[in-house]
Image: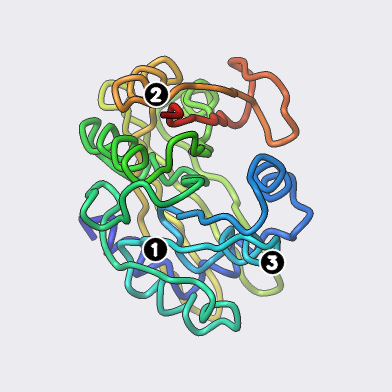
Amino acid sequence: MDTTEEQFDAHAEAYDALYPLLDDDHPMITFIRDRLPPRCSVVEFGIGTGRVAIPLVHAGLDVCGIDLSARMLEKLAAKPEGARITTVHGSFTETRNLAASRHSAVICVFNTLFHVLQQREQARTLEAAAAALRPGGLMFLENSSAHRLVRKYPDGDAVRVHHQETGRVWLLAGVLDELRQRLDVTHIRIGGGEISPVPVSFRYVWPSELRLMAQAAGLDLVEEHGDWSGAPYDTSSRLHICVLRKPPV
């Protein structure tokens, strides 16, 4: 599985069990909703099976999304809220896949930017977001803190339990390459007499690098936090959350 599309197609079957829907009152949903006008249009990069999009629909937002994985989008379409969400199968690094200057917000969370594995393509993601936003529109970015990621792999690799239920366990086995800013993780599902490995790859981004990408894309950094409750970001933070704004005309 060499491509992100193949990796997430393989994840589609078990994804909802591993990462259930966020409740409407989850801090992320509240944080986003409180910064946007009612019933505005938002686009989610890497919409997947709707983990974030469906609660945003429940919060009264007009949601559309784009994803490389056809299997993930099929899972979303089969849900009751799927009929209310317009989706595009394709890459969010390509501006031609997005409606120009239409949206009040771009949502790019849960390490979606990190799943873009080349620095130039990550920069293109921010450029595509800027092109999709109305003047004054916001981009919400959530990634794991690069500082903390590196500390989790002091010897370059580690194995941990990600999820456990009766008769089944999911392990994470990761290998980190600091020179390439690359983390390759295999989700290993063990249960029912089977062992199912599914890989996922990341290119993590340092905060200073992300700020430069945003500036080059014409987006202003207006907020930076270490969690969705608004705590300040520092090197001990688990998350790196940024709110970027496309300057008003």
Residue beneath the point at 69% across and 66% down? 58
The nearer-to-camera label among 3 and 1 is 3
Q: Amino acid at mark 3?
A: His
Q: Nearer the viewer, residue 45 or 59?
A: 59
Q: Amino acid at mark 2?
A: Leu
Q: The residue tagged with tag 3: helix, strand or loop? A: helix
Residue beneath the point at 43% across and 36% down? 135
- View extreme (right): residue: 25
Q: The residue tagged with tag 2: helix, strand or loop? A: helix
Label 3 belongs to which residue? 58
**Residue 65 x %, y %:** 42, 61
Q: Quadrant of the C terminus?
A: top left
Label 2 belongs to which residue? 210
The nearer-to-camera label among 2 and 3 is 3
Q: The residue tagged with tag 1: helix, strand or loop? A: strand
Q: Of callouts 2 and 3, which one flags the residue occurring earlier in the amino acid sequence?
A: 3
Residue beneath the point at 50% across and 84% down? 78
Q: CA distance from mark 1 to mark 2?
A: 31 Å
**Residue 127 x %, y %:** 29, 36
In the image, taking residue 177 as reference, residue 158 lies left or right, namely: right
**Residue 31 x %, y %:** 70, 41
Q: Nearer the viewer, residue 47 or 239?
A: 47
Label 1 belongs to which residue? 197
Quadrant of the image occupied by residue 183: top left
User: Given contact means CB atoms under 8 Å apart, are the residues at marks 1 and 2 in contact?
Assistant: no
User: Given contact means CB atoms under 8 Å apart, are the residues at marks 2 and 3 in contact?
Assistant: no
Q: Amino acid at mark 1?
A: Pro
In the image, taking residue 198 as reference, residue 85 lies left or right, namely: right
